[in-house]
Amino acid sequence: MITAYCLSYGHWTVIPHQLQESFADMADCGFTAVALSFSESEMMYARRAFEIQVNLAHKAGLKVLVVPSRLGNRLAGAPLMPSLWLAQHPEAQIPDHIGWTGPMACVESSVFRDWIKGFMTTLLTDYPLDGIVWDEPKAERLISKHPETLAKFGPEPTPEQMEDGYIDFLDDLTRHCLSINPDLCITLFNQKTSSERFTAAGAAISGIRYAGYDGNLSRQSYFHEEPVWRKYRLESAWDRTVNECAAAGKGTFALVENMLMPQAAIPEYEANLDACLQQYRPDHLALYYYAHNNEDPETVQAITRRLMRKHL
């Protein structure tokens, strides 16, 4: 599987022929699937827009994977914004915690679990989706003093117990989604900065088909500042991916996060992607499609297209 990671938040003005052209171009590049983001905003204001995307992607011959984004602030994906539902339900929040994206849902909270299961039920019932990508579980070691956490783990929960709680939450949510559609292809990718204890347990969740990591291949900058290496290199997580997936009996996954790229970093991206695609062959490979906030997106996309055709 070769997935065009196409975080699609913000389709307020939907122009179907432009989407059709984009999906046809993805297929021409060699992509076999597209990953589309779906947040609370889409659930409220973009239901028809998402339906158009799904139908046109299928018409182009692509499988459609959904990236449930920012739900309870416990998963990533587009956009960078707090969970609106969570702000309205303080009883589901980790007490006395405000992170850089706002409040954080407690994964032991039955209120939160019921809400996110209902959210996924609507999503998977209303759209003919082929799979899910659980994108970067967040704050898995953050101590929660929520009453339901304390009832489960005692008065002084440890970071390791918080990891166990998150794995239980993700396992429960994955099983719920598969009960709606047993044919879903579910991919999980973690951050290399998470503990190996946590990431190995995530890969071992029943129902997860592919597991792995994302990573960069070039320096990055947000605007005009000097480019720097902001994230770990993708290759640095490969041995860990292979070992965890072998132990769990799962397929390997890797996401090339070719975003936030200034002009000066494009040559190193080209060289590193060339070497990466030659050396590593994940069972599920994802690359950003016209990735976010690149200074010269056309050149980056041309490089990606050429090297995909060369190696894949």
Image (cartoon, grey):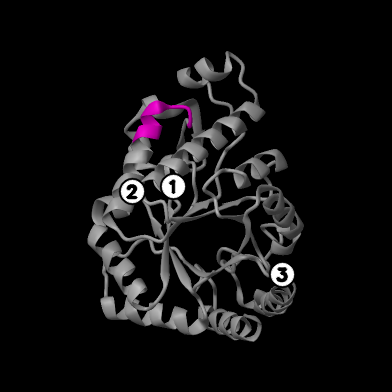
Disc 2 residue type? Glu
Q: Is residue 69 left or right of residue 138?
A: left
Q: Which residue is mark 3?
A: 280
Q: CA distance from mark 2 to mark 3?
A: 35 Å
For the residues labelled 1 and 2, the Cα–Cα distance comes to 8 Å
> Circle 2 sits on which residue?
40
Q: Earlier in the sequence, mark 1 or mark 2?
A: 2
Residue at numbered disc 1:
70
Q: Residue at x 71, y 72 (%)?
A: 276
Magenta stretch, main secondary structure class: helix
Are the residues flagged by discs 2 and 3 in contact, CB closer than 8 Å?
no
Mark 2 vs mark 3, foreground winner is 3
Quarter of the rendering containing residue 271: bottom right
Quadrant of the snapshot with the C terminus: bottom right
Report the amino acid beneath label 1: Arg
293 w.r.t. 167: above or below: below
